[in-house]
Image (tube, coloured by chain):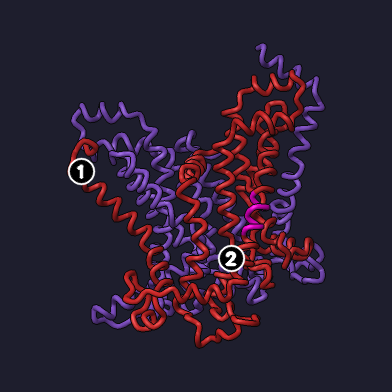
Chain colours: A red, B purple
């Protein structure tokens, strides 16, 4: 038995340390590159252990902080409003589907399930949102298309309600005269907290990391989320200093630590996720596990 | 019996409750109709000569000309080959690797280290593909990339990664594995820990070696999950991770022969080439073939092992 064998355990731990290094080391390259002095970067390139450390990339970022702060603002707004709207709609759809009293509940479930099997793809979706709903270059383009509701989460919540909310409790509340909205808000949801946390985190992460909707629907810089800024800077490092007055305009392309600053901005983009993640790790794991079980 | 009666009675008595339940679903139904069902109908755009002023429904029909135009160029064969090829490799390697990690995680003792390992291997999964493309650039950049520095310091010639096709099937496969292995390992691990431990004990008493235990206890226990995962992936055979194929190669045109998948092609044709017809034709094939794949894969699994089928 490996689990009782000491050498076996050492080997296993060794393998996992290697796997963890493989998973995390690329991020360290990102961080240490962003903290390398520009001249050193020019000479030695990106490296894990730079010879000369320097915070100059971040100093330059601070000079054009306006765009980044704005990007954070957009991302935060979209993530909060989007996640809130998405969770409310998902819960309000999933709860009735879990009640036996709902007529045609299998029909409605199929209505949701079918969207997971078949979809129209980018072209008709893009045409509809831009031609019919004129969503281009509005903040709603970052919230509504595709992300607002996903059949997967509805099915996941429905299965959870069906399995974990006893009929008797709902019946008793009804006999006491509670309406369906009150039952959902005051009885069902408090019983579903861990599952709700999982859903909030997974949907929130989707919003935070989304760059596709910006790519499809946003061309105006003032609506760039942090991911959209990252996406732009890959091809255009001058983006940060463009169209600015005061201190930043003094920062011309030649001064700009273009090699290091790319990495610094990427670090800025991932820090919030990496800071929050360890505290909610178990909910993410739960979300993954639930995802593997069919609804 | 009593329960059924109560339900029936309730059903008759409280149409008010049913109305309340219906009213809850209205926002969701409206959203799914707009976001999901109308675009399904909009797939007819593939058979039309799209005109922005006339819209999807008003544009003129052109029969199959969008498709014949698509297949006349080399693009159709290229994007099909890339999409299917990468998917097959990802499904095979991704699942084998994840199952191996899950089994090792199960044999590991100690709570703390297990938790740390699980936390760390999941980190790549949480990061957007845009940031991943920055990281890959840190390794592969021609002048300052980590790999080229390593090659030069070992006395070799720097490699121009972003202009040569031959490297990219490997690079994309590695990036895909790196980003996804934590996720699927944890998914499989959840099934592995659910396997009845008395089965292992029985096998141990019978003198089965570790490999035999894995073969006769763990893998059969994982069969259902593996089938479900592969089935889901097969259903996505004509889809690809747009970020992986669009962002990670840094949009380098020189390597598009091995990095353009259907999703990338549809996006480029729609927004950069302004070629709505070919984009729509490729998108139509993706949607319809994808749907057929899901149904076919499910049908096969139903025949082999009914409990593992999705529907």
Circle 2: element type: helix
Magenta highlight: main SS: helix
Which x, y percent locates residue B102? 35, 44
Q: Reply above or below: B225 against A104.
A: below
Exactly how many numbered labels are in the figure?
A: 2
- Looking at the rendered structure, which numbered label has been put on residue B115? none
Q: Going 66% across and 42% down the picture, which residue do you hit?
A: A90
Residue situated in front as seen by the camera: A198 or A101: A198
Chain identity of mark 2: A
Range covered by the magenta-colored residues: A76-83
Which x, y percent locates residue A140? 72, 59
Name the quadrant of the N terminus of chain B: top right
Q: Earlier in the sequence, mark 2 or mark 1?
A: 1
Q: Residue furthest top?
A: B2
Residue beneath disc 1: A8
- Do discs 2 and 1 belong to a common subunit? yes
Q: For residue B279, what is the image quadrant?
A: bottom right
Q: For residue B53, what is the image quadrant?
A: bottom right
Circle 1: element type: helix
Q: Are marks 2 and 1 in contact (CB under 8 Å)?
A: no
- Looking at the rendered structure, which numbered label has been put on residue A226? 2
Residue B167 located within the stretch drawn in magenta = no
Q: Reply above or below: A164 against B223.
A: above
């Amino acid at each position: 038995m490996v689990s009782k064998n000491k050498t076996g355990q050492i080997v296993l731990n060794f393998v996992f340390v290697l796997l963890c290094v493989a998973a995390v080391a690329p991020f360290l390259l990102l961080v240490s590159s962003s903290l390398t002095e520009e001249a050193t970067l020019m000479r030695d390139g990106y490296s894990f252990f730079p010879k000369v450390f320097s915070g100059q990339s971040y100093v330059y970022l601070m000079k054009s902080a306006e765009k980044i702060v704005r990007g954070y603002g957009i991302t935060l707004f979209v993530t909060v409003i989007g996640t809130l709207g998405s969770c409310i709609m998902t819960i309000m759809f999933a709860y009735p589907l879990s009640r036996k009293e709902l007529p045609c509940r299998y029909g409605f479930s199929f209505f949701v399930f079918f969207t997971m099997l078949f979809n129209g793809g980018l072209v008709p979706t893009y045409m509809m949102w831009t031609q019919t709903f004129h969503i281009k270059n509005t903040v709603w383009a970052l919230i509504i298309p595709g992300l607002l509701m996903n059949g997967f989460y509805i099915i996941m919540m429905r299965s959870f309600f069906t399995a974990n909310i006893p009929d008797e409790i709902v019946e008793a509340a009804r006999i006491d005269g509670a309406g369906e909205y009150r039952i959902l808000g005051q009885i069902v949801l408090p019983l579903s907290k861990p599952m709700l946390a999982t859903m909030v985190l997974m949907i929130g992460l989707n919003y935070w990391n989304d760059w596709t909707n910006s790519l499809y629907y946003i061309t105006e810089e003032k609506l760039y989320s942090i991911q959209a800024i990252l996406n732009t800077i890959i091809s255009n490092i001058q983006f940060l200093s463009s169209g600015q007055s005061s201190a930043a305009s003094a920062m011309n392309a030649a001064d700009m630590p273009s090699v290091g600053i790319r990495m610094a901005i990427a670090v800025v983009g991932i820090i919030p996720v990496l800071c929050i993640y360890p505290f909610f790790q178990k909910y993410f794991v739960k979300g993954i596990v639930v995802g593997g079980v069919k609804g | 019996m009593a329960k059924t009666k109560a339900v029936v009675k309730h059903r008759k008595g409280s149409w008010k409750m049913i109305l309340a339940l219906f009213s809850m679903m209205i926002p969701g139904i409206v959203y799914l109709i707009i976001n999901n069902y109308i675009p399904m109908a909009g797939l007819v755009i593939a058979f039309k000569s799209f005109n922005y002023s006339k819209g999807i429904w008003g544009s003129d029909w052109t029969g199959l000309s969008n498709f014949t135009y698509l297949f006349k160029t080399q693009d159709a064969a290229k994007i099909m080959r890339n999409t299917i090829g990468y998917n097959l490799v990802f499904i095979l390697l991704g699942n084998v690797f994840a199952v191996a990690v899950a089994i090792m995680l199960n044999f590991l003792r100690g709570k703390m280290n297990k938790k740390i390992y699980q936390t760390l291997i999941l980190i790549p999964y949480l990061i957007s593909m845009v940031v991943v493309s920055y990281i890959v650039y840190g390794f592969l950049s021609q002048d300052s990339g980590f790999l080229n520095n390593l090659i030069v310091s070992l006395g070799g010639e720097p490699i121009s990664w972003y202009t040569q096709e031959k490297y990219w099937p490997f690079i994309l496969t590695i990036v895909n594995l790196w980003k996804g292995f934590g996720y699927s390992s944890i998914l499989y691990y959840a099934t592995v820990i659910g396997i009845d431990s008395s089965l292992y004990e029985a096998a141990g008493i019978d003198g089965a070696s570790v490999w035999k235990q894995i073969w006769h206890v763990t893998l059969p226990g994982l069969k259902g999950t593996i089938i479900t995962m592969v089935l889901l992936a097969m259903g996505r055979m004509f889809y690809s991770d747009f970020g992986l194929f669009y962002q990670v190669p840094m949009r380098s045109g020189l390597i598009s022969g091995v990095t353009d998948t259907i999703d990338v092609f549809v996006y480029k044709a729609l927004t950069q080439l302004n070629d709505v017809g070919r984009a729509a034709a490729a998108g139509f094939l993706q949607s319809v073939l994808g749907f057929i794949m899901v149904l076919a894969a499910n049908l096969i699994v139903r025949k082999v092992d009914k409990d593992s089928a999705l529907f």
